[in-house]
Amino acid sequence: MTSFSDLGLSPEVLQAVIDAGYDTPTPIQAQAIPVALAGRDVLGIAQTGTGKTAAFTLPMIDRLAAGRSKARMPRSLVIAPTRELADQVAASFEKYAKGRNLSWALLIGGVSFADQERKLDRGVDVLIATPGRLLDHFERGKLLLTGVQIMVVDEADRMLDMGFIPDIERIFKLTPAKKQTLFFSATMPPEITRLTAQFLNEPVRIEASRPATTGENISQFLARIPSSDPAAKRMALRALVERADVKNGIVFCNRKSEVDVVAKSLKQHGFDAAAIHGDLDQSVRTRTLENFRKGELRLLVASDVAARGLDIPDVSHVFNFDVPHHADDYVHRIGRTGRAGRSGQTFMIITPADSRGLDKVLKLIGKAPAEVVLDLDFSQARSEPRGRERDRGRGQGRSEPRDAPRAEAPAQDTPPAMAPKPVPPPSPAPPAPRKERAAARPRPEPAPESQARGPRERDDDGSVVGFGADTPAFLMRAPPRPSVAAQDD
Ligand code: AMP
């Protein structure tokens, strides 16, 4: 097995690696570091969690060891799509370049121009920036990119999603043609391929294996609900969160506005949740993320863009509140759990409006996750006056989820790790399954609607039906229909 000392790094950087506690290079590090040290361009197809940040940071530190920066002319440039990601890259330089005479500056929105300009004026070896802020500084005449010897583009496909490609092209053109480029993207859509063909010089292509999309340690589930109403989806989400053994989880929504609504709704229902998306103040985003990292926040409700690239170790659950617009995002989302060999569970809520998006995800992952059946009366999702829940929430404190059914009696066959749940009624009939899923997994006859919503009864085998051996234990028994489950914010 390759060791860090085989890669050609300096003793100082090797020491920093040891201090960081790493024993062995990850595959992308083992392949990219020698190539980058040799001064060649790298096209790294790797996503977060593969160790790609160190794969470019470590060789850069050594390559920048000789030479001095000039005022307003950074010697290297790292472009990242989001502030958080740029922040993480900066933290990486701070960690690995400790004790080295290497200066860096971070140009991101939400930080005062004056502070950033002061640093630039002094001259920096590494400039880490989001594209917009970088160009703002350039246009103010505070920055020259003609001294850039190494340019890193991180998460290029995310830049594409965010509409940054024209900015990236412009930045490339502002830097010297003769420079080293280290370019990273999790996927290679045609626009990204075109960009690399135009601006990279005979790059060495390195592909790091994707996070385990079908990995043993990530259990993926779908939760079909009969309504596309967002209130019904929020109700389903609460039931999933309540019934799973969630240590900490990320709830993904497709839109920022939805992120806000879902986070607010979860809070109103007593869950410990907070939102993170690009429209929030930087200080709020940083604080939320920090709380989540420290384990002081249980549920992070996020947009793909905000969560992209965030290094959050050890997330027990991922909830896809929405089926992602891009199937690739599903892979990114679920890759937030099941890291470093830990186990994780992911749930995606599917409404009748999601069939196309779901097809794309299933095609990409090449398998049909097991389905869980939620025994909820979705017709009630909006039946309460909207003000009432809020009033109740204020008056009674929020320590318990409103729709969190409490166990009435321990279920005999519930594993110890799971909260005991009372016996469920059979579930409402799910929409007709797609062909391949139906073939993959036998389904029981759906229960008639009246039975599904009728008085609580034990099903034939005493459990929720339809999963086979994959059934998450907490769903083997569903809770009673909660008296307040119908309420939403
Ligand atoms: P990244 O893909 O760059 O976001 O890195 C993901 C995580 O892996 C970060 O928490 C790094 O600190 C960690 N990491 C990077 N390289 C190694 C390594 N060689 N061994 C163990 N952990 C690593």
Image (cartoon, rainbow, N blue to C red):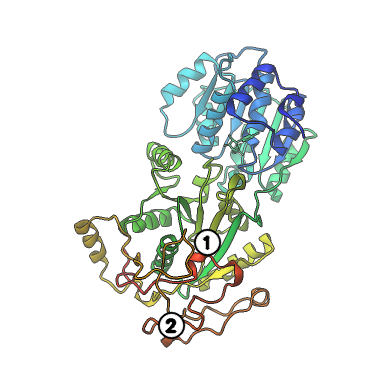
Q: Count every numbered label the image shows and give the total.
A: 2
Res 457 quadrant in image: bottom left
Residue hosting label 2: 452
Q: Residue furthest left?
A: 395
Res 25 quadrant in image: top right
Amino acid type, residue under disc 2 in the picture:
Ala
Question: Residue 482: percent from the left, percent from the top?
Answer: 33, 71
Q: Is residue 317 rendered to the left or right of residue 219?
A: left
Ligand 1 rendered quadrant: top right
- Residue at 54 percent of width and 40 percent of height: 311
Q: Is residue 270 rendered to the left or right of residue 355?
A: left
- Position above or below: 216 against 138: below
Element assignment for label 1: strand
* Separation of residues labelled 2 and 1 (CA atoms): 22 Å
Q: Is residue 203 rendered to the left or right of residue 322?
A: right
Between 22 and 386, the one nearer to me in the picture = 22
Residue hosting label 1: 347
The answer to whether the residues at label 2 and label 1 have Cβ atoms under 8 Å apart is: no
- Position above or below: 180 against 324: above
Question: Residue 104: percent from the left, percent from the top?
Answer: 54, 21
- Position above or below: 301 against 36: below
Q: Quadrant of the N terminus?
A: top right
- Residue at 32 percent of width and 57 percent of height: 270
